Image (spheres, helix red, strand yellow):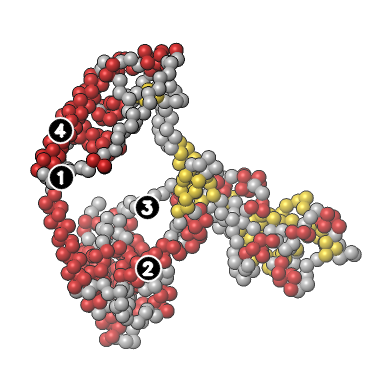
Amino acid sequence: FEEDSDSGDIQCILCMQYNNVEYAGKWMKRKSRKGHILSGGHQKSLSLRQSEQQEVETLQTIHRSQEEQFINARSDFAIPSAALLPIQHLPVTHHDISPDEEAMWKEYDLAENVLFEAGIDPGFAAEKDREAFERQAEEYGIWAGFETLPGDAGGDRFWDTYMDDLDLVEEMEDLVLEDKNLSESLPPSNAEADEWFPYPSKVIFLLDTIDNLPRLRMSGSLMKVVLWLLRELGVKHVPSFDALRKAQKGLQKKNGIPTVQWKSPKGNAFSFNDPCILVTNDWSNPKVVPYIRPYPVIPKDGVISEIWHARKWRHDCDRHILSPMWDGGNQHYYIDEPARLRNGKLVIPVRWVADESSGEVWADAWEIVVNKETTLATILDERIITIKSKDLLENFLNLEDTDSVPSWCPKTIDAGHATRIPNPDRKLAEGDPLYSSFIDLFGDDVSGNRSKSWNKHWNIYMGHRNLPRKLLQQQFHAGAPRTADETISEMKAQVHAACIGIAAPIERRQTDTGVKDAYTQYWIDKLIDRARDIRKTQRNRSPASIQEELIAWVNKNIDTIYNQFLMTE
């Protein structure tokens, strides 16, 4: 038996070595030792050990017999007497057994049922585990449901497919589908690179798109075939396979969202996406940036439904962590800096506020009063006034250029206002617009485990709170259902646009709205061609008169032009 020095529990080395699958290294109390020895599992381990010993003895007997036959067959084989060393007998020492040792031997006096081992051979134990597992698989039907064992299931088909792939790779190499020294065509022009930025060209954009389709994965071998096919068709600017992979890695490194690996002070490892990059992507996305609210917002109906509607942003929050500036086009106005209104008054904006009803930006501000006798200015910070941002005329930099920044009175200097002019955030921005983004953190245990063994699974969620909740909680947007009346209205707008004879506006409408009826499209094409023919044959007519004539014809043939399924009430 092996004893745990900490708990004092024991485990049977014999069962671990010969019956590890059933025994599984169980620890037991010392008082359970005798019961374990009499158990069927231990007896089974004993029989396995005896069988193994018998096999070893049989092999040793056969080996000795073979050696004797070999020696007897060699009559000239002799061992020189000088090579035989005398046997030296070591003196036998005796010592008295202490009472503790005698008690120990009595406790473990279990005849042949006790096994003392120096350890377990890992290789031998692994082989025994494998054999025991195979016996259990056969006895308990672990492979139930399979006609053959997994190792044999479909083996021939698998290797046939694998060999076919190897043959395909060899054939591709023979065709020189991918030559690392392949000379490519001229690189794309700067205009094309700018048009498809951040991709180097349209070809790489399309190749990267098809290479990352979620339900149609492409192997590297198939991508090489596609690149070879494009070259054979004479497509310009086709990259090599290595160049494509290099461009994809560069795009991921430059424009992707890096995942940061981190370890907490307690040693817990976790991963998170860089929140700075997430916010950057929101600000750089032209479809998202219109929804970002950089300032506290006054709700149009008085109902608080977003975080920027509440009092915290409007009054309680430190105004210096809110967005510090308003972009007036060619001038940036910062809080804590003097600015001139269109009526000539000087003010100090202290907080920017957006009006949800009109969409205009307002400012809470302090008035500046100049003493005509001393020419010293005082900031009236006891009272806040509200001004429209569009009424601002000159910012601090313009006042500084025209030497219009007033000198401050001792009261204003003692209040510390002069030390905040200019606003230090202006230097940080270096001429770029500067706004504040708020990150919300929410954490919860999502394991759902209610048992005594609480397996914690904590998730932490980060959200860009300058965005509306409907966007933060939205995973995809299928669009609101469109009624038949809305579809007919859009189709009529497309038909009327076709009467001018220009197809581009119609294609843009179809892309933006998603409305394109195959039946009506036939008549749209006919109307475009008809308008163009009239312009060619009657050059003195204006586009408006041509459109009016064709619209009149359309109104007379509504039942013919529009899909009757959409007209049915």
Q: How far apart are marks 3 and 1 (CA)?
A: 94 Å
The residue to which callout 2 is attached is 246
Q: Can residue 315 be seen in this view?
A: yes
**Cβ atoms at labels 2 and 4 below 8 Å apart:** no
Eye-nearest disc, 4 or 1? 1
Q: How far apart are marks 1 and 2 (CA)?
A: 73 Å
Are there few (<14), some (14-19), or many (20+) residues within 10 Å of tag 4? few
Q: Which of marks 3 and 1 is nearer the N terminus?
A: 1
The residue that label 4 is drawn on is 61
Q: In this view, does 275 lie to the left or right of 15?
A: right
Query: Which residue position holds label 3?
Result: 477
In the rendered structure, which amino acid carries the disc numbered 3?
His
Look at mark 1 in the image and give the residue it sits on: 77
Packing grade of label 3 (10 A; few <14, some 14-19, many >=20) is few
Are discs 1 and 2 less than 8 Å apart at CB?
no
Local crowd size for mark 1, using a 10 Å CA cut-off: few (<14), some (14–19), many (≥20): few
**Residue at 31% in and 77% down:** 181
In the rendered structure, the answer to whether residue 362 lies left or right of residue 272 reads: right
Disc 2 marks which amino acid? Lys
Secondary structure at badge 2 equals: helix
Name the residue nearer the viewer: 542 or 37.
37
Q: Nearer the viewer, mark 4 or mark 3?
A: 4
Give how far apart the Cα atoms at labels 2 and 4 are. 68 Å
Measured as percent of width and height from the top left, residue 276 is found at 52, 56
Q: Earlier in the sequence, mark 1 or mark 2?
A: 1
User: Considering only order in the chain, which callout, 3 or 4, is on the residue closer to the N terminus?
Assistant: 4
Q: Nearer the viewer, residue 239 or 71?
A: 71
Residue occupying the point 36% across, 77% down: 544
Task: Say what amino acid the circle numbered 1 marks.
Answer: Phe
For the point 32% across and 60% down, the residue is 212
